[in-house]
């Protein structure tokens, strides 16, 4: 077990096995998760022998190191982290006037193979551990703290399909949410999925108030299967049934992500079909003018606004995601792919 993936009780067990006073566990957890401390030596209320034991066992608090970074003119920062096995993942910090939103990765690569996604095209390598997921947050929190700032929102929308790494993702959410740690409210955390039906139903059973975002991207099975192979396994009707179950169990509104791809899913008729699909559902549509990565192109700004207007006219709550980081390799997986090619 890696240290940043442990709850206080687990750290306590680890300490007890080494004849170290168990009350140190809460101090260590607080240094790691509340103060986002970068080294054991900075844990000033721990005796030297405890620091020594931690250093011997774990080396450093985080099982990742910064391998590369890019900063956009709009303030968006993209980090490429190298893990202990030299696999790499991306994390993106998106600041605006009110929020510091962090987009984190849950897998090295992804097996879902969505056609518009650079990560999907690079294939699946492995799941991240809870510690590797949480450590992306702690690393960035450490940087922000130095500027008197803090992460306000976390979105599980980076590399990987979060619900395909269910246990580690849930553990990481509970660690981020922990009152002795970062204590970030579950409502400030969004888990995104391409539509894994059994896991959506399982998530509905968890006692968590996290936001759920569904990558929808098309309104018919034929179209959706074309860009998202997962749709062949879990077609739209089954997916929406699971979403209804989630809403019924949690009372939470679901966010439907819809990446607008020119000449594919961006016509006013498709907007009408989308409104029919979501009518009567507790929902919000997030329109995303696609970040061009392959053959797919982005619709015109006018086309995007028209699509949004059709949804509004049908009383479907909608927003258009502001483009961020367009001058850096902002689409998920692009920075990693460039580095792999190099
Ligand atoms: S969009 Fe998400 S689920 Fe699809 S391939 Fe990319 S990372 Fe995986």
Image (cartoon, rainbow, N blue to C red):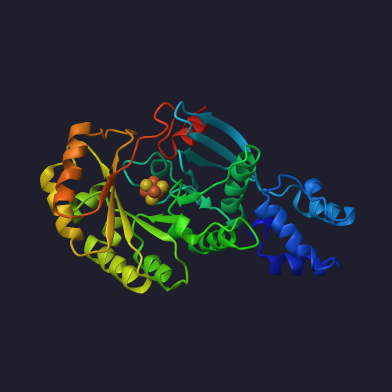
Q: Examine the image and state in which quarter residue 18 appears.
A: bottom right
Q: Which part of the image, by quadrant, shows the N terminus?
A: bottom right
Q: Residue at x 40, y 70 (%)?
A: 204
Compared with residue 324, is residue 319 higher up or lower down, i.e. above or below?
below
Q: 273 or 177: nearer the eye?
A: 177
Image position, residue 122 (x, y; %): 43, 41
Residue 265 seen by the camera: no
Q: Residue at x 44, y 65 (%)?
A: 209
Compared with residue 338, is residue 261 higher up or lower down, i.e. above or below?
below
Q: 257 or 309: nearer the eye?
A: 309
Residue 295 seen by the camera: yes
Left or right side of 188 for 196? left
Q: 185 or 29: nearer the eye?
A: 185
Image position, residue 58 (x, y; %): 75, 52
Image position, residue 333 (x, y; %): 44, 39
Q: Residue furthest left?
A: 269
């Amino acid at each position: 077990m890696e240290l940043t993936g442990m709850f206080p009780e687990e750290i306590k067990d680890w300490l007890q096995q080494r004849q170290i006073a168990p009350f140190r566990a809460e101090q260590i957890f607080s240094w790691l998760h509340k103060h986002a401390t970068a080294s054991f030596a900075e844990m000033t209320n721990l005796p030297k022998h405890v620091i020594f034991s931690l250093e011997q066992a774990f080396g450093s608090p985080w099982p990742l190191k910064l391998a590369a970074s890019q900063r956009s003119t709009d303030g968006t920062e993209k980090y490429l982290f190298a893990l202990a096995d030299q696999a790499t993942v991306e994390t993106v910090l998106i600041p605006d006037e009110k929020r510091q939103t962090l987009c984190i990765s849950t897998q090295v690569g992804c097996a879902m193979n969505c056609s518009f996604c650079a990560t999907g095209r690079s294939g699946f390598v492995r799941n991240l551990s809870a510690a590797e997921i949480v450590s992306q947050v702690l690393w960035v929190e450490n940087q922000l703290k130095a500027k008197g700032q803090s992460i306000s929102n976390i979105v599980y929308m980076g590399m990987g399909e979060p619900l395909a790494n269910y246990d580690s993702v849930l553990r990481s959410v509970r660690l981020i949410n922990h009152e002795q740690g970062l204590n970030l409210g579950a409502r400030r955390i969004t888990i995104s999925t391409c539509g894994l039906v059994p896991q959506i139903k399982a998530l509905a059973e968890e006692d968590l108030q996290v936001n759920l975002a569904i990558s929808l991207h098309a309104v018919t099975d034929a179209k959706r299967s074309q860009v998202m192979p997962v749709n062949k396994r879990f077609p739209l009707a089954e997916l929406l049934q699971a979403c209804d179950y989630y809403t019924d169990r949690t009372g939470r509104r679901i966010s439907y992500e819809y990446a607008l791809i020119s000449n594919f899913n961006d016509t006013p008729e498709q907007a009408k079909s989308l409104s029919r699909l979501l009518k009567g559902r507790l929902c919000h549509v997030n329109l995303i003018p696609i970040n061009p990565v392959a053959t797919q192109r982005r619709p015109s700004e006018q086309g995007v606004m028209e699509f949004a207007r059709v949804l509004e006219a049908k009383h479907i709550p909608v927003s258009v995601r502001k483009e961020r980081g367009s001058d850096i390799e902002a689409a998920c997986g692009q920075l990693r792919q460039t580095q792999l090619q190099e």
